[in-house]
Structures are given as C-alpha cells and as structure tokens.
Image (cartoon, grey):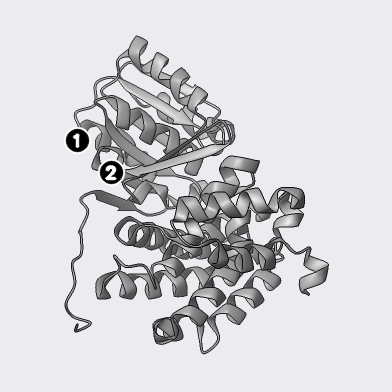
C-alpha cells in the first residue's frame, strides 16, 4: 500500500490563541448561545475564574477543585449540580482534570463546551473521555465531549510551577510520539506530530529556565495544542494505555508517568517496528529514544516509576492489567514496565 493511501478524520472546532485573549471569553460564549454557564476549574485557577465571572452577565454556577483521573464519584456530584442549575454551556478553566470532568458532563448532558486550558495536557483538542472507579480507568471517544471552542492564553500558564510545567509538557510530548506508530495514523497526522515534537522540545527547556517567559510559554502552548490535535486523530496505544492503567490503579501523577514511560516505549516500538525510525528523524534525530532520555535528564523530570509511587510488589498485577487494557501480549508489556520501574539510580 502507498504511504499516500490513508483515511484521516478532520475534527471540528474553533481555536482562539494569543496572550491576553481570555478577555474574549464573553463574546465566544455568546457565539455558542450561552445563557446559563457552569464553570469547572481547579483551585489554582480561582483568580482567573473570579475575573471571568465578573464579566458574565448571565446566571453562573461554579465547581472549584477537581481530582486527577476524574473519579466517578466526582462526576456524579458534578451531574447533581448540572441537574439542579440546568446550564446550557460548560466553561472549563484549568488542566486535564478540569477538562476531563467537563467532558464527562458533556457526555451525559446536552451542553456546549468551551475550554480554556492552563496546562499543556492537550485534552481540550480531543474527543477522548476518561473516568476512574475502584482502581480502574475507563476511556472512550465521542464528539459530544469535543469542545466547540478552545481559548489558549499563554499568560495563564505563567503561574505553573516548574515541576508541573515539565511534567505537563512531557504529557503533550507523549501524544505526538505515540502517533508515529499507531494503525490509525496518516501522513497528515505524522507531519503534525513532527511539528508538535519540535515545538515542544525547542520550547520546554526555555520555559523551564525562565518560567515567566511569555514568548517561550506561547511556543510550548502551541506545541501542546498541536499535540492534542494529533492525539485526537491518531488515538492511543501502549504508551497511553499503560499510563491510564497505572493512573487508575495507583493514582500516579499523569504527566510524571509520561516523563518516565515515553523513552522506554519509544525504544520498544523502534525495535519492534524499525520502519518507523525515519518518521522520528526530523523531530528527534538519529536515536529518538536516547534523545528523549537526554531531554528528561536535562529537565530533571522523573525517570523512574518507583520514584513517583509505583509499588514494586504489584508489578505482576499491573502488567497483566496493562496487557488486557492495551490488548497486547504480556511479553510485550513486561520489558517496558521493568525498564520504567527501575529506581533511577539503577538506570543512570
């Protein structure tokens, strides 16, 4: 089959990008026909939320404070608020957890969705939803959860601590890296992935060194936006599904997991699918896995699952759950998980 024989889903949505453009939120809400707005946001975004509430001349309800991995109990509580307040629009302000909760509301109720991301998670660009319950994480796809409008304002990322910035950027990087080998990828997706990888790699060290650099923050946020678009069309594979399982089972930090897992999964995929090597060359050079390891090291990001809370005594249980969730053989999971779970001092 020719490389130019493919299918590609182009997803709808409006993007508003630029420093200070959160000020356009009232007009964007009006364009969506908003008349009653539920705002969902993290506790670290309260100042932004308060400022926007003061600009909205319509009934507004808020849910402040979200939890990672979107627990089912939190979803049920949010739906109770929705059923009582009856909004026709949900405005989410925050990271992937805020966006994720808003998506679950949109999945279950008839509301429009506008997202203002304040991290680099990329969830705002995808029709992928996820929720956790009883140590298991469930995911799916639906256009109902794809935001109609996304407002990217790099000024809102300046307050992110260095650790959160780096881990969130690693999350974005994982989106475009995995797109290189998934069955549903296409030349359009691969080109987008290369652009996103280069943007993230070129910007993240500048941001880590100068957290208040708006120009560098803009470049990193643009890379994260492109990465989210790539994830939306390519879908997920072993890398993301491993993180989903480990997050659901052990409540590990989402971005930190990708900092640890991504170089190991890339090394595994390159050995199993050598024909994909050229796809990485423009973005990461001749040794993509080593380039990723080196980047993680320079950023002082987590390099071992053991260091972020993975319990070694539950290795077999985790490996079996990943193999089932990713629909792969256990023999494919164990080497990756073994390498990622070693304490950093053993892998140095």
User: What percent of the width, then of the height, locates residue 311?
Assistant: 74, 48
**Most foreground residue, 268 or 80:** 268
Q: Which residue is mark 1?
A: 31
For disc 2, the neighbor class at 10 Å (few under 14, some 14 to 19, many from 20) is: many
Which residue position holds label 2? 149
Residue 161: tell me if it is visible. Answer: no
Residue 25, above or below 161: above
* First of labels 1, 2 by sequence position: 1
| Residue 24: quadrant of the picture | top left
- From the viewer's perspective, is 16 left or right of 61? left
Where is residue 336 drawn, in percent x and y? 61, 67
Q: Quadrant of residue 257?
A: bottom right
Q: Is residue 59 visible?
A: yes
* Most foreground residue, 214 or 234: 234
Q: Quadrant of the C terminus?
A: bottom right
Q: Is residue 259 above or below residue 62?
A: below
């Amino acid at each position: 089959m020719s490389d130019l024989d493919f299918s590609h889903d182009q997803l709808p949505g409006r993007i508003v990008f630029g420093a200070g453009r959160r000020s356009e939120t009232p007009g964007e809400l009006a364009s969506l026909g908003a008349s009653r707005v539920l705002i969902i946001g993290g506790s670290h975004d309260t100042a932004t939320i308060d400022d926007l509430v003061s600009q909205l001349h319509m009934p507004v309800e808020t849910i402040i404070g979200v939890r990672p991995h979107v627990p089912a109990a939190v979803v049920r509580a949010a739906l109770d608020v929705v059923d009582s307040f009856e909004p026709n629009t949900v405005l989410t302000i925050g990271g992937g957890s805020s966006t994720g909760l808003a998506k679950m509301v949109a999945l279950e109720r008839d509301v429009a969705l506008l997202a203002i991301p304040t991290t680099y998670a990329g969830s705002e660009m995808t029709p992928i939803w996820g929720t956790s319950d009883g140590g298991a994480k469930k995911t799916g796809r639906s256009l109902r959860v794809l935001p109609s409008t996304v407002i990217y304002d790099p000024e809102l990322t300046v307050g992110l601590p260095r650790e959160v910035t780096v881990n969130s950027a690693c999350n974005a990087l994982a989106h475009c890296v995995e797109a290189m080998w998934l069955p549903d990828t296409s030349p359009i997706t691969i080109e987008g992935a290369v652009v996103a990888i280069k943007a993230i790699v070129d910007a993240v060290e500048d941001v880590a060194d100068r957290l208040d650099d708006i120009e560098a923050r803009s470049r990193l946020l643009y890379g994260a936006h492109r990465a989210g678009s790539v994830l939306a069309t390519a879908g997920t594979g072993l890398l993301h599904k491993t993180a989903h399982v480990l997050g659901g089972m052990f409540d590990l930090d989402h971005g930190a997991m990708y900092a640890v897992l991504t170089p190991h999964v890339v090394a595994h995929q390159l050995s199993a699918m050598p024909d994909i090597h050229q796809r990485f060359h423009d973005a990461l050079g001749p040794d993509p896995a080593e380039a990723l390891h080196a980047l993680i090291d320079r950023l002082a990001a987590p390099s071992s699952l053991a260091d972020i809370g993975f319990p070694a005594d539950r290795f077999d249980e985790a490996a079996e759950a990943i193999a089932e969730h990713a629909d792969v053989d256990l023999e494919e999971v164990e080497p990756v998980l073994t390498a990622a779970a070693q304490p950093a001092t053993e892998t140095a």
